[in-house]
């Protein structure tokens, strides 16, 4: 997971200082390559996300009580990569603090509907297994380069998530080993009780099914060869930000999924949110993904 280095406030404005990740989002990587990623590359990304999810799902408070955190927003735009094969899951807990990924406003549904679990679509309570379903949908997308459940409308997307047959991953990626395909389909079970119980279990099953072919070295080599210009652009953005820092000039880094800006959301003001790392509440915080060329509606 991305590290939180500091949090505080200046007057009425609250801020979070997060680890700088010198790499693009997986959404940007997908938008940069033709088709899907090599299955070994996609598998390594998913396996490392499993590690981060499990660590967060198991977080406990000072009394040893599990916090019950659920990401609720696992998607390519919230996964970032580094050129040495590292993977970072970002934006954790923000959706939980909003109480729901979906908001309704005069009949309009907002949120990344393509990655919702069936139970979330039905308005039922969700737990960590909803994140595993979203990660399964993300894994499928990494393999074929297109969203698994994306349809023309939210209603049709919900129907696809809840009812439509899920294609055999090997029908779109014949090179995918059958054991890996079974892991993917297990994560996409519509009944939560039939999915993996934990992200640790899913990650272990994926690594076992991959017969030792997953590695950060393989991921890093692919990124350096195929996505070098994405890293160069990111480095340029960082240099501009560092140059402007002395002048206190705001700078937006395109591949940074967390941006703080003017109030947006409800009419007449921004929405409030609370971080799982702090009881404070802030108004006027804006969160968005900014993977160039991609959006996750």
Image (cartoon, helix red, strand yellow):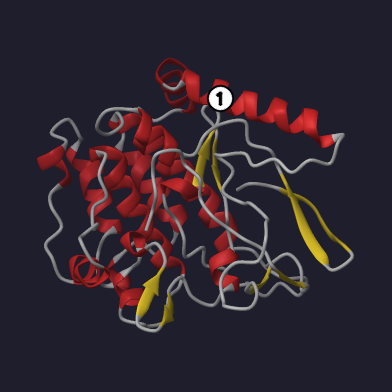
Q: Nearer the viewer, residue 221 or 156?
A: 156
* Residue occupying image coordinates x 52% and y 67%: 70
Q: Nearer the viewer, residue 93 or 63?
A: 93
Q: State which quadrant residue 150 falls in.
A: bottom left
* Residue occupying image coordinates x 49% and y 25%: 230
Position in image of residue 211 (x %, y %):
31, 32
The local crowd at label 1, few if under 14, some if 14 to 19, many if 20 or more residues have their Cα within 10 Å, is some
Taking the view exactly as shown, the residue that stands out farthest to the front is 268
Position in image of residue 215 (x %, y %):
44, 28
Describe residue 104's horizontal placement relative to residue 192 as left or right: right
Position in image of residue 257 (x %, y %):
56, 48
Position in image of residue 196 (x %, y %):
35, 61
Residue 84 visible in the shown view = no
Describe residue 153's horizontal placement relative to residue 95 as left or right: left
Which residue lies under the disc numbered 1? Answer: 233
* Residue occupying image coordinates x 48% and y 28%: 216
Taking the view exactly as shown, the residue that stands out farthest to the right is 11
Instruction: Report the number of discs.
Output: 1
Q: Secondary structure at mark 1?
A: helix
Describe residue 292's horizontal placement relative to residue 166 as left or right: right
Instruction: Quarter of the image for the C terminus: give it.
Output: bottom left
Vertical arrangement, residue 52 with respect to residue 172, above or below:
below
């Amino acid at each position: 997971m991305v590290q939180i280095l500091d949090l505080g406030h200046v007057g009425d404005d609250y801020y979070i200082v997060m680890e700088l990740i010198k790499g693009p989002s997986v959404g940007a990587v997908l938008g940069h390559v033709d088709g899907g990623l090599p299955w070994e590359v996609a598998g390594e990304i998913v396996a490392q996300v499993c590690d981060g999810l499990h660590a967060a799902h198991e977080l406990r408070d000072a009394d040893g009580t599990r916090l019950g955190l659920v990401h609720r927003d696992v998607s390519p735009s919230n996964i970032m990569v580094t050129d040495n094969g590292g993977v970072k899951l970002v934006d954790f807990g923000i959706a939980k603090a909003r109480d729901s990924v979906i908001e309704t406003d005069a009949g309009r549904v907002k949120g990344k509907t393509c990655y919702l679990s069936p139970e979330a679509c039905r308005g039922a309570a969700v737990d960590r297994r909803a994140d595993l379903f979203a990660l399964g949908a993300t894994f499928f997308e990494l393999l074929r380069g297109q969203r698994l459940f994306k349809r023309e409308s939210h209603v049709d997307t919900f129907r696809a998530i809840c009812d439509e047959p899920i294609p055999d991953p090997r029908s779109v990626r014949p090179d995918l080993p059958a054991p890996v395909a079974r892991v993917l389909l297990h994560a996409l079970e519509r009944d939560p009780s039939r999915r993996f119980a934990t992200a640790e279990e899913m990650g272990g099953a994926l690594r076992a099914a991959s017969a030792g072919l997953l590695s950060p070295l393989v991921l890093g080599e692919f990124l350096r060869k195929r996505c070098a210009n994405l890293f160069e652009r990111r480095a340029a953005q960082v240099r501009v930000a560092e140059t402007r820092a002395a002048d206190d000039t705001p700078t937006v880094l395109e591949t940074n999924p967390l941006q703080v800006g003017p109030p947006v959301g409800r009419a007449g003001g921004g929405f409030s949110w609370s971080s799982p790392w702090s009881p404070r509440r802030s108004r006027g915080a804006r969160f968005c993904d900014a993977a160039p060329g991609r959006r996750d509606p």
